[in-house]
Each structure stands twice: as C-alpha cells, then as structure tokens.
Amino acid sequence: MNRPEHLTLESARAYLMAQARKRGVALEVYAERSTATTIQAFGGAVSDFKLSSRQGLGLRALVNGAWGASFTENLAPPALDRALDNALENAGLSAPVPHAALHAWGTPPTLDLHGEGLSGVTVEQKVGLALGLDQAARDADPRVQSVPYSAYNDSEGQISVEHTGGLERSYQTLGAFVYAAPLVTEDGQSQMKSAFQFTREFTQLDPGQTALEATRKALALLGARPAPTGQFPVVIDAECMALLLAVYAGAFSARQVQEGKSTLAGRLGQSIGSSLVTLIDDATLPTGMDSRPFDAEGCPSAPLTLIRGGVLQSFLHNSQTAAQDGVHSTGHASRWSYQGVLSVAPSNLYMLAGQGSRADLLARLGRGLLLTDVKGAHAGANLITGDFSLQAEGFWIENGVVAYPLEVFTVAGNLVEVLSGVQAVADDLTFSAYAAGAPSVLIDGLSVGGSADPAQRAGQTGTGGS
C-alpha cells in the first residue's frame, strides 16, 4: 500500500488555496515553521539539551458570515482535504459574526527580523556559550553558591498568511536568548535574581555581562531588613514597571473591553494617567521581541499610541473587534500558533522615556520605597478592576539614596491610580522578557504591607545598593 505524498509547507498552502477556489469557498491559511535549541548548564556541564522543530497550517473558512477553524500538521493531500472539510463543517455549526470578511490589506513594512541567521553557528558554539554563561555567573563573586538556572535558547521561524481574496505574504524571524539566575549567600541569608539578554544576532550575545548583571542584582538584596507598613511614595524601577505593564497589557485589548473584562472599558478619550504618561505598542521595532511586519490576519504593522499625555487614545484591534467598534484594525490579530484561535494581543508595548536618571528620581523621592520586582500577578492582579496586591522586592530610600534592601513584602494599588500618580519619568527605558518596556517612574504612593512598625523602621540605618 502506497503512503500518500507529503507536501512541503508552501506546497500544502498552495494546495489548500486551489481546493478552496475549486470549491468556491472563502479560506484563510496561516502557516508556521519553526526550529529551536535550548541548552541548560549547571555546575560546569550541560544539564539539558533540546532540539525541536514543528510546522503546521491553521485554517479559517468563512461560510455565510460564520468562521470555522481547524488545523493540521499532516501535509499529505488527504489530511489537507480533511482539514478543509473540518473548517467548513465548523463554520456551519457557528453563529454568523457581523462584518466578518477576508480583507485585502495594504503592503506591510519591510523589517529585517532574521539578521545573519544561525546557519553558520555550530552546536559546539551554542554549547560553549551556555557553559560560558554558567561559568561566568559562578566566577562573578565568591558569594555565589551555585547557578540553579542558566540557559541559552534560540528560535528561527517563518510565518505566512494567505487567503482566497488574493492576499499572500510571509516573513522570517530569529531570536537568541541567554538567561542566568545565580544564588548568593552571606551570613546565613540567601538571595537569587535573574538577568537576560535577547538579540537577533548570535554574535551579539554577551553571556559575561548577563552573568554579572544577575549576580549584582542578587548581591544587592543581601542584608535585607523588615519592610514597613503604610502608604509611601515610590520609585518603581524600570524593569518592574515594564512587568506591571505586561501584566495589564490585556486591559488594552478591544476584545477584553467589548466583553467587559477590562478596567479601561468606557474610558476611551478620558484621562487615565499623568500628563507624563505616553504608552505605545510598536510591532515594527527591529530589536523588539514580538516584532512582525503584519499580524495573524496579514494586516500591516504600525506604531500605535494607546495613551498620549495621560489620555487613552485607542485599544488594540483585530478586524473583528474593529468592525464591532466601527474603526480600522490596528494590526493586533494574534495566534499563539497555527493550533490557536484568532485573538487580540500586543506586540512590543512600552512607555516613553522621560528625562533624567533613576538616581534623579530617588533624589526627588528623598524617603520612601524603591520597588524593583513584583510576583504572583496570575492571582494578585485583576484586569477588570485594575486592582493588584502582589509580593514584592525593593529597597528603603533615605536622603535620596538606597539605605538597605527590604525583606519580601506586599504592595497594593490600582493600575489607573499608578498611571495617574506618576510625578516624574526617567530616561532608562528597559524592556522585560515579556516584550514590555518602561522607564523608572516616581509615583505619589503605594500601600506597603511589611512586618516592621514605623518606630522600628526609624531606628534602622545603613547603606546598600540596587
């Protein structure tokens, strides 16, 4: 018995287009191919080595105003026929959606998201980099006890979108990533922090710098003292502010707004932040982790201002949410893979930098809290109300400089209150590992839940670093 012929991804996509046109149905095909390498090192040896690759096709058929979706990783013609049949059958079972259509989008921007590629990089070079990262972190300081987490990762991919309305486009992308988290110990106290670097060129990776940065952050937390309880003015460090933005990125999704799941619903055109706050989502940043020339529907990417001078200007839209609101798509249709359904998501979300350094903000703060990290957002941050109560790390500030690190404490507040309370913005725009970026900001106050009373805090003195 002869096995059916398996097509290439490009041929399979063309086969589906031909079949759809032959049958007179409207069809969109999202194709994805990717390869990835992950190497973890521990104690001078490779502890995990993983090579992975995958490819597949996500189908969306439009029948009588209703969408039907399916996907396949089998590229043999009989499997492709079944995937098309499934998409059509699912459309027949779905309710029509107002304004559903395949769009003839304009030309997307030209972006180099692939650089020199990885074809000239050997496995030995990747292993050497992972081991070098582990070694650099262990050698960074005598107080480093071990490096529990140290890894190199790269990923190359190709994404294309084509539909029977005449649209056909694709792009290549590459990302290389190193991550280190050393454990440091002194006087019976242990701390662990992490640092990362993302690039589009293997040769630009600097594992030594990443190891030093992670070690510096962990050492700064040694000697932590109990945090006070109360309402205090706060400088939110750039990396922490970026994390908060990433946590609340979903609040800017028009889908979340239309479903009543965003604290920003009904606030378009209103002031939701200080005049110093301008928030942008830009998928065209050459070095952005989530950059792309077009979205999952093929709509061209372009910078989008969400908040300008504190005023909410726009939400993130795909074609469906845009039609519902009577606006144009902003190019934020998203699929987590060819297996996923179409949704709405940000790309590179960031807050514009201001003037002056973080040290300038601390000097202006005088006495209060430097917030450097928050955790537990999956349970402690509410997108509907904007409220949050999160485990936190940071430093106590006296006379405008770091006095000492604080033991783990909690901070509570509200997204809109944080944005409205911004009094100064620094120039240190920093992107997190979640593709969100922010500068350090000085805000008027947050509720801090610590374990030291104010009298005890007043008696604490010393200097530290962060």
Image (spheres, rainbow, N blue to C red):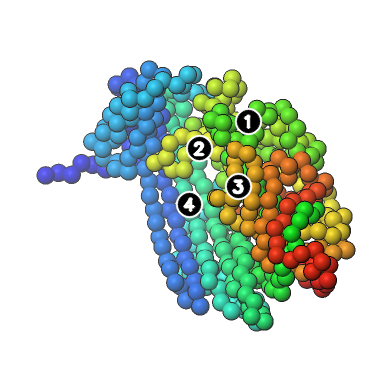
Which residue is at a point 38% across and 37% down the rendered structure image?
58
Circle on res. 381:
3
Residue of label 1: 265
Disc 3 residue type? Ala
Residue of label 4: 156
Seen in the picture, residue 439 relative to 131 is either above or below; the reply is above
| Foreground: disc 4 or disc 1 | 1
Residue 360 location in percent, x, y? Answer: 85, 56
Residue 30 location in percent, x, y? Answer: 42, 36
Q: Are marks 2 and 4 in contact (CB under 8 Å)?
A: no
Label 1 and label 3: CA atoms lie apart by 17 Å
Label 4 and label 1: CA atoms lie apart by 37 Å
Relative horizontal placement of residue 420, taking residue 72 as reference (left or right): right
Label 2 and label 4: CA atoms lie apart by 19 Å
Circle 1 sits in a helix, a strand or a loop, which is it? loop
Residue of label 2: 334
Label 1 and label 2: CA atoms lie apart by 21 Å
Circle 4 sits in a helix, a strand or a loop, which is it? strand
Kindly indicate the quadrant of the structure image that contains residue 215: bottom right
